[in-house]
Amino acid sequence: MAAERRSRREFLKRATTAAAAGGLADLLPAGYGEARESDGGGARTPADVAGKHSMRAHAAAHGMLVGCAVIPEKLTGEQEYANLVAEQASILVPENALKWAALRPAPDRYDFRGADIILVFAQAHGQKVRGHNLCWHEALPAWFASTVTRENAAQFLTEHIQTVAGRYAGKLQAWDVVNEAIDPKSGLPDGLRKSPWLEMIGPDYIELAFRTARKADATALLTYNDYSIELDSPDQTEKREAVLALVKRMKANGAPIDAVGVQSHLDASAELPGAGLQKFVRELAAMGLQVFVTEMDVNDRKLQGNAEERDLAVAGVYRNYLTMMLAEPNVNVALTWGITDRYTWLKGAKYGRAHGEPERPLPFDADYLPTPAFFAERTAIDSRRKTA
Ligand code: G3I
């Protein structure tokens, strides 16, 4: 253990050096490279990220919520994970526990155990919870394809939303009511994604889901959530414009929509989001809609260089992107998709780094040490006007 701690200490010192070299030295607090405190239960993260130094405390001082996607089994089974989530987050979202695949073991049966663990944990730690998600083309249970048809799809969707949103009515800050319904590459009218819901119900499935969710929960902020709408590239601009057009149609029809979720799965080797996204956020503000950063992570898989250099590139994206987004008055919530690299969805063949090196996309690494991204996210939060 001592040798392992030494190597991590060496890594931290190198990160400090790289930070200074990379012109991001202001991101890392004094002593970032110092040894970690340790206690009988194992090493702890440096004191400079706890208590008043935590992401949660800085967010509170700047009138916003900050948090992460969580895994119920880790909240109950891994004390270090639970402590970190409790200390750093003021809002949680179930990474998978509120999806159809998790909730619906059978057409006539629901399993809320995972979601309930998260709601109980959040209540115990004074945290908000956002729901994700009531209607998606992915994470559908194995029985779905052979059971749901054109004739009964609207009834299945309605009953699912009534049951799930009804169970948590009044307890959630927001719901991702419909997730990722736009995909211009599908080549369908209005850029709608080819999905079982569209095929079986038609385009009205989107407003059906929102109207049903509002009837089931009068207070949750009803959100449309999507990805790859951040950059000024032609593809992402086209998709962002299709999302805006969808939201405008919904507002014109009187559908109950309160917010748009910008997932923010970013790539450290790509261009930074800029004017196009800023304009999108302001157009939504003009329509009275909030914008949430719902699933941020910054993958470094295409970057060259050593871990310290890649960390700084990732941190630079966190700081620049969140500073831009959090400067907008209708952006007051930011979540990362996970809190520790140990459980990032980016691991593995499809999204992992070459040669299986660990991905480092989140504010805490696989050893629960704060990465430069932590300090970058906190710096972006501090760039907002203080409210407390
Ligand atoms: O729970 C089962 C387990 O019982 C089984 O043994 C195991 C092996 O098949 O699978 C487990 O389910 C997996 C689940 O994650 C929980 O780990 C699913 O196969 C796997 O597909 C699922 O992946 C999730 C993915 O959404 C699809 O639902 C990722 O963890 C999750 O990070 C990812 O999150 C999505 C957001 O919901 C929407 N935006 C994009 C984002 C990243 O894809």
Image (cartoon, helix red, strand yellow):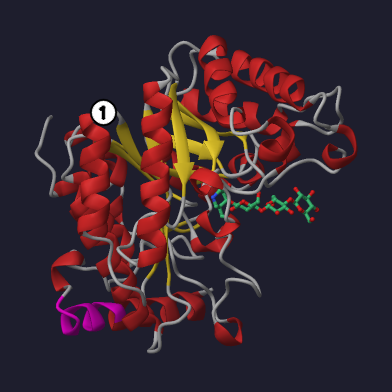
Q: For the residue with label 1, is its CB less than 8 Å from the closest atom of ligand 1? A: no
> What residue sits 42% from the left and 76% below the top?
8
Residue 119, image x, y percentages = 55, 26
In the figure, 363 relative to 70: above or below?
A: below
Residue 156, image x, y percentages = 76, 24
What is the crowding at mark 1: few (fewer than 14 residues within 10 Å), some, or many (at least 20)? some
Is disc 1 placed on a helix, strand or loop? Answer: loop
Is residue 67 at least partly visible in the picture?
A: no
- The residue segment tinted magenta is 15-23
Is residue 155 at least partly visible in the picture?
A: yes
> What residue sits 65% from the left and 33% below the top?
202
In the image: residue 25, left or right of residue 350: left
Question: According to the image, label 1 marks what residue?
Answer: 287
Residue 62's quadrant in the figure? top left
> What residue sits 65% from the left and 49% below the top?
194
Compare residues 93 and 2 and report the one nearer the observer. Answer: 93
Question: Would you say residue 221 sits in the magenta stretch?
Answer: no
Compare residues 325 and 372 and report the one nearer the observer. Answer: 325
